[in-house]
Amino acid sequence: METELMRIGISLPDTLLGKFDEAIEKRGYSSRSEGIRDAIRSYISSYELMNDIQGHCVGTIAFTYDHTKRGLSNTLADIQHHYSYLIRSSVHVHLGHEDCFEVVVLEGDGKEMVELAKSMTALKGVKFSKIIIVNSNEISDLNRISDLNGISDFSIGDMNQCFGALIKSNLKNG
């Protein structure tokens, strides 16, 4: 069965489009359309994974934002105070006159963590965000894996590989 392709139009800042063009060229895409389709599929996959989060979890929300955007800093602070029972720690870094980088470390109910992340990262003026949420059971599974293999320490790379494997296995089983 052939899928009908729909033509759409989008507006992007020239710097973002330039970076996108560089990325798709390096990845070998034949066109912007292929790159955009792949990016949309990746976004949908990430979104679906976030909606499946449940139970006791740990995680981080890392984001950059324009602190000169009227009311944004106060809104972000209000949201964080509303969800303070989930927040274990946060780090705030000034990147220049306008931009800030913040990392919020979380522990608690996974669905509430997703709500917190969505409420912060969807705000106008938040430029980039990366959300990582891991179910506590998966961490226990990683500890059992390390015990079986006689590994006492994981490097960041090892952890990323394990999380990637867990996500792939969840995608296959879910």
Image: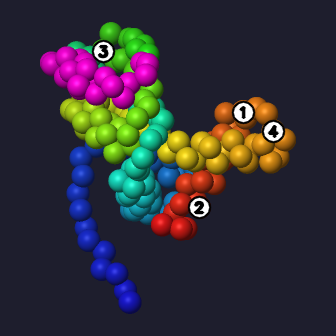
For marks 2 and 3, give the one nearer the viewer.
2
Kindly identify the residue that appears in the image at 69 percent across and 38 percent down.
157
Distance of label 2 from label 4 (alpha carbons)? 21 Å
Which secondary structure, mark 2? helix
Residue type pointed to by label 2: Ser
Task: Report helix, strand or loop for mark 4.
Answer: loop
- Assign a secondary structure to mark 1: loop
- State how far apart marks 3 and 1 are (Cα): 34 Å
Front in this rendered view, residue 155 or 72: 155
Q: Quadrant of the N terminus?
A: bottom left
The label shown at residue 151 is 4
What is the crowding at mark 1: few (fewer than 14 residues within 10 Å), some, or many (at least 20)?
few
Look at mark 1 in the image and give the residue it sits on: 155
Type of amino acid under label 3: Glu
Q: Earlier in the sequence, mark 3 or mark 1?
A: 3
The crowd level at tag 3 (other Cα within 10 Å; few <14, some 14-19, many 20+) is few
What residue would you read off at disc 2? 169
- Label 3 or label 1, whichever lies nearer to me, is 1
Q: Which residues are magenta?
A: 69-90
Check if mark 2's residue and mark 1's residue have beta carbons within 8 Å: no
How far apart are labels 4 and 3 at the CA level?
Answer: 44 Å
Closer to the chain start, of discs 4 and 3, is: 3
Task: Provide residue 98's location: percent of width, then percent of height.
Answer: 30, 15
- Neighbourhood count class around disc 2 (C-alpha, 10 Å): few under 14, some 14–19, many 20 upward: few
Residue with the most extreme right position: 150
**Relative to 153, does residue 134 appear above or below in the rendering?**
below
